[in-house]
Amino acid sequence: MANSNSNSHYSKLSQHFQKISHFEHLSALGDWDQATMMPSGGSEARGAAMAELAGHIHELKTADFIEETLNLAADEVLNKEQAANLREMQYQYFQANIVPASLVQSKTQLAYQCEHAWRVQRKNNDWQGFKPNLEALITLVREEAAIRAQAQNITPYDALLSKFEPDMTTRRLEKVFGSLKSWLPQMITQVQANQRNDLKVEIPSFSAKKQEALGRDVMSFLGFDFTQGRLDTSSHPFCGGVPGDIRLTTRFDETDFTQGLMGVIHETGHARYEQGLPKQWRGQPVGGHRSMAIHESQSLFCEMQLGRGAGFLSQLEPLISQHLGAELDSQALTALYTRVESGFIRVDADEVTYPCHILLRFEAEKGLVDGSLAVADLPDFWAENMQNLLGVDTRGNYQNGCMQDIHWAVGELGYFPSYTLGAMYAAQFRYAIEKSLGSVDALVAQGKIQVIFDWLEQNIWSKGCLLSTDALVKQATGEPLNPEYFKRHLEQRYLK
Amino acid sequence: MANSNSNSHYSKLSQHFQKISHFEHLSALGDWDQATMMPSGGSEARGAAMAELAGHIHELKTADFIEETLNLAADEVLNKEQAANLREMQYQYFQANIVPASLVQSKTQLAYQCEHAWRVQRKNNDWQGFKPNLEALITLVREEAAIRAQAQNITPYDALLSKFEPDMTTRRLEKVFGSLKSWLPQMITQVQANQRNDLKVEIPSFSAKKQEALGRDVMSFLGFDFTQGRLDTSSHPFCGGVPGDIRLTTRFDETDFTQGLMGVIHETGHARYEQGLPKQWRGQPVGGHRSMAIHESQSLFCEMQLGRGAGFLSQLEPLISQHLGAELDSQALTALYTRVESGFIRVDADEVTYPCHILLRFEAEKGLVDGSLAVADLPDFWAENMQNLLGVDTRGNYQNGCMQDIHWAVGELGYFPSYTLGAMYAAQFRYAIEKSLGSVDALVAQGKIQVIFDWLEQNIWSKGCLLSTDALVKQATGEPLNPEYFKRHLEQRYLK
């Protein structure tokens, strides 16, 4: 067996994946610029350049030599980290090669058209216009899922899940989400019944400029290093860029600063994860984020576990008063940020009702993929489930019903569970932190927020993809995913 | 002979060059972002990504199939524009392939080191530190020039010129610049003697924000379309991006708004040229700018012919008063923008003294390339020529003498003449415009600036590289380069 010197097969792969990461850097830059800076006149040339780049990256990811070299490298002497890197290379190569290029291309094209039309159709509540596009796209998604399933000997929906959550299965999700479904709707009713309406707070208006200055200070409070990234605005907030240069965005509504501010806190969670990924593995597959649920766990840890807690809000009080000059004490902030209200829109939902939106989408996606739910029946399915889960009537309201998310309009099925898995992991991480360091709220209130980030860096961020998701969570918390911590968190915050 | 259908050799080349332009789009974006947006933490990853991209573009430009395909395409039936495109492809291929990759690489690396050290050495007036680096770099430049010269059967300095000015020769430049040298120093003396010192104006301070708002309005007045580009700030102003999305930058000095404003006007000239290049040829070699002198002619047309004229400054008066709130009438603005003062620094020079800086550099570069001027003798050469041309004493003042420009520190010789050629072309274009449309000053004062841009678009911008520089200038003005128009322009503005 050869060892992993610079002429080894492993080393050849490592160089190749580093090269891919350089082109992905340019792709991230192009995406960010398009969303934040690019004038409309640039879209044609940019579209062509980004398509060319995507094609080039795909060529590199599916290069002929990789398969054989992966096999040869598997026989080389590798240390633990290198072995993990090789495993992630294999996974990425497999994911990139599993679907025929022709299918990828048809799906990309159809998704582009469907999304483009959806932007107008959603505004017009035009379900009849959207339906045939979605049907055509779902047909391709099923085809993709079948191919992925056969190659991995798993079910089609598992195969879609695995694009975002390696090792997660439908069966396991059904167990986790089934438990959630058994107690969450009742809890929502109870929380809303107990909720003190006299604490409802009027939100004053503030200029975007003031909100942005506040946002920057809150980012610094959350340990964001502005020599390693930027904050800008875009119509849909996101966290992009590369680990040394994270580009996060938010949007500011002058009549409601609370959304933009929480958006900044959420995206800062994503950003700190990316910035904290192992520096020595930058550009290598093992140096990337573990899964989308783990990514969401970091943003939701910031937003939900820290951001809506009393300790954090008491720290926010002077910053808000400094930048917005308004008299919003931490009691008012707490009332604003922990209000529970059943509504139509997933992205506007509070922490307690949010998982219901995911439960519904999970069931719908499974049905769309296995064929038990026809696209034509989606609105009825939606209305029935929204009624059962949240007591909300969505009949005829397609734009705020099954047409509200971009995910299906671009053919992305299997992603939604990551959001609620992320919320569960975040609660579980908090529990582990409190076990070793004491109350998170107290730590933040005492100005010791850094020790919390140190824990996350040591246990989550710096691990990149060295471990599987289960192993990562177990090493950090002593057990794999346990949704009980999420339940306990909601009970403590909303029912005590 | 085959015709140019989609399977033709010509068409294959056309697709290949389009592909190159997509990667060049990403390169332009990366450069712009680095200068305007990127936080310091991004430099390592960006440097690696940009080097990867440059390597990829070089590979594409020197792809094996190109040479033979160019020959085969030459036998195909092409229309006039396609034939011009093929000629430009041949030129670009030749320029990319002429120098061995190993030499390109050593020069790039040495230039990077030399520039990096120069940034500190210049600040410290450290000629002894800079000298050996420049010597090593000039040795490589001579090697490059010799290879380029031999391949084209021209002189080494001609070969360097041809990178920026196809068809321009040292002999022709010597004639043009020789004439300039015969009358310019005397004219400068005369202008300065006549200059009314009582018109010297104190410049008030204005915030960068106000200057930027003024700059944007002036850009709009110059016909810049903000759906096709942006204005940002960077430490060195430039015009980048791609034709549908031009990214221009300037810098604002709060104690002197005149420089930043003229910078905006200058870069807008570059921008309008790029935006006006033939749309149907975007991404093809024939769709690019004709030469660096023609590019400079457009920025200098805006800055010198329009920008410092009485008609333009009278239009500027209300905009300045609106944004800066200051009482600067067009007489004061004219005094500010037409003051002539001999100084050390090229980039700070006025329109009249500027060409002296170029005359000196042209002579120096020729000597450095043919070996008649040693790097060690550069400071003495500089001192003597600055004394003769501008009556300025630069002895011992290296940082404001031969160390002031970045060009040589990165091994770029042969570029400087383009600046003064540009000024000459701009004067010649103005003359042609006035012959057919009447006084430029009067047109601008009457709010008819658009007809001037229409002329430029029709005669210069929309021609891209369809014609050679000489043919372009002759078609637009009736004759090839004639420096008499530049002399006449200076006489009219400064001696009447």
Image (spheres, coloured by chain):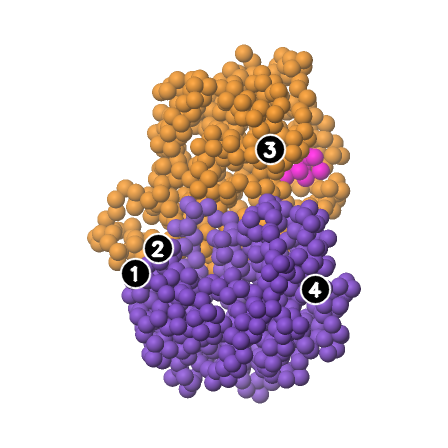
Chain colours: A orange, B purple
Kindly state the secondary structure of the residue where label 4 is placed: helix
Q: Is residue B301 above or below residue B218?
A: below
Of A454 and A296, which appears nearest the observer?
A454
Q: Is residue B189 visible?
A: yes
Where is the C terminus of chain A found, in terms of image quarters? top right
Q: Which numbered disc covers residue B124?
A: 2
Residue B477: % across, % down: 66, 80
Q: Which residue is mark 3?
A: A211
Residue B158: % across, % down: 44, 81
Of B125 and A384, which appears nearest the observer?
B125
How far separated are the C-alphas under marks 3 and 4?
A: 44 Å
Q: Earlier in the sequence, mark 2 or mark 4?
A: 2
Who's the residue at 43% across and 63% down the image?
B405
Query: Do the dots labelled 2 and 1 sit on one chain?
Result: yes
Q: Which residue is mark 4?
A: B310
Write down the quadrant of residue B403 in the picture: bottom left
CB within 8 Å, label 1 to label 3: no
Q: Is residue A475 above or below residue B225?
A: above
Q: Is residue B272 above or below residue B373?
A: above
Crowd band around label 2 with a 10 angstrom C-alpha radius: few (<14), some (14–19), many (20+): few
Query: Do the dots labelled 2 and 4 sit on one chain?
Result: yes
Q: Nearer the viewer, mark 1 or mark 4?
A: 4
Q: Which numbered disc covers residue B129?
A: 1
Q: Earlier in the sequence, mark 2 or mark 1?
A: 2
What amino acid is at disc 1?
A: Gly
What amino acid is at disc 4?
A: Ala
The reply, left or right, for residue A98 in relation to residue B209 is: left
Who's the residue at 68% across and 53% down the image?
B328
